Structure formats: structure tokens, C-alpha cells
Amino acid sequence: MSNIMPKNSVDLIISELKNKEILSKFTKDECNILDKEMKEIRYEKGQEIIHEGYKPTGIYGILSGTGKIYKRGFNGKEQILRFVKKGEIVGYRSLLGGETFSASCTVIDDITAVYIPEIIFHRLLEVSSKVAFDVLKKISQHLGEAGKTITLLAQNTVRERLAVILLFLEKKLDVDHEGFIKINLTREEMANLIGTATESAIRLISEFKNDELIEVEGRRIKIINHQKLSRLGHVVS
């Protein structure tokens, strides 16, 4: 048996669900549910994977593509909480908490996801210490990210916030072969991320471009001066 650890949460879950030792701890009914209900689903840009307020029936593992997790305010305005990409799982916190989804997840770049029913996910957590530890680690990481976001919005200027967000997006989502961050956000979405008006975001992005901190092609953004951007955002590399 290979000792190579799976690269991400989704690979780990799929690997454990193929492990004969793990499956031997599932009941016959659970194995039937696994065979019949675990499936790959294709979502196109703009489609929702989970919807705020709905009751979860399982979790979704991202096999490819990118999505955004966000909440809507009373005025209908979005607040983006985080982005998800290949290898990440969606919907698990609400499922574990026995709650309705506290946020929605919408596709930014076409997503292929694997759906894992609630009963299978719960059983897997019981019998696989690897999956249980991985999920605990993910919850801790997301709590840490949430704390940093609160501090960022409360203590930094809008200009500093834009610098931090651009560096974060590049680190989180990587870049394409031309060096552009692998996400196409509208100016409204960018404004939402940094907590400002759309007009202010447009002006700041233009200023960053003129200052030769970034290169802009439509919605695509490339960081061309990481050092200055890091100093501006007080980011320690």
C-alpha cells in the first residue's frame, strides 16, 4: 500500500472511501447509499452549489474550478467570505453544526464537484482519524482567516486593504501562464472584498496600475511589484 498522503481534503476523502479497511466499517445500507448517491456534478458559472438558509444534505468536494462563499445583507448586498478551489470541501461546517447553510456558494469558474451524502460523511468522520483531523484543521484555518479579515477591515485603510487582498488572492488561487491571478472578479466584487464603494475600488485599481504595482486587462489583474505592494499592505513575507 502506498504511503503517499493525498494532496488535499477531497483527495483524502475519496482515498479513504476507496480504502477496504475503512469500508469494512460501513454497514450494508451505508455502502448502498455510497454507491447510489455519491456522484460528480458539473456546475456552470453563476450557478449555486449551496444556498444560504437551506438545510444541508451532504457536502461538496471541489474537483476543479473556483467558487465564492458569501452572505447577503438585509439590503441584498453580498459580503464575500472566502473563495474555494480544487481540493476544498464546501458545506461541512453547517452540516456538522446541524444548522442551515449560513452562506451561499456560487460558481465563478466552471466547477466539477463530488457530492458526498450526509450519512457517508458522518460515518467517515467516525471511522477515519485522517479525515476527522483534516476537517478539524480546516475549521481552525477558516476561523483564523475570519479573524484576520475582521482586523483588516477594521484597522487598515482602503488602499492598504486592496494591497493585502491582491496578494492574498494570488497566494490562494495562484496565477496563469501569463502571471495573472486565476480569478476574474467584477469591480463590484472587488469593492465588496475590500469594504468600499465600487467607484472607490475602480479608482484605486487605476491608481495601482498607474503606480506600476499591477497590470490590468479587463477583469484580469497581475501583480508586477510584489515588494511595494507588500510594504503598502504591511505584509510580512
Image (spheres, rainbow, N blue to C red):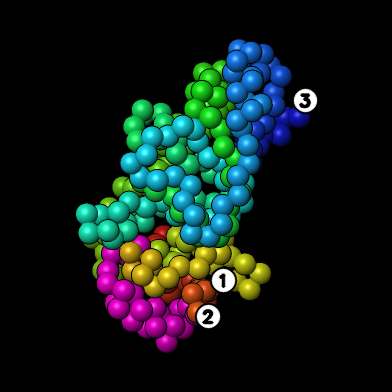
Please give the name of the residue rendered at 37% of the width and 83% of the height, measured from the top-left corner: 207
**Residue stretch rendered in magenta on the structure:** 193-216
Which secondary structure lies at badge 3? loop
Earlier-in-chain disc, 3 versus 2 = 3
Q: Is residue 199 visible?
A: yes
Q: Nearer the viewer, residue 92 or 76?
A: 76
Magenta-colored stretch includes residue 197: yes
Please give the name of the residue rendered at 36% of the width and 28% of the height, measured from the top-left corner: 98
Tag 2 residue: 217
- Direction from residue 194 to residue 123 in the image, left or right: right
Q: Amino acid at mark 1?
A: Phe
Query: Do tag 2 and tag 1 residues touch (Cβ < 8 Å)?
Result: yes
Q: Amino acid at mark 2?
A: Glu
Please state which of the two labelled residues, at mark 2 or mark 1, is closer to the viewer.
2
Please give the name of the residue rendered at 57% of the width and 37% of the height, measured from the top-left corner: 115
Which secondary structure lies at badge 2? strand
Q: Amino acid at mark 3?
A: Met
Q: Position of residue 75 (x, y in %)?
A: 22, 59
Tag 1 residue: 180
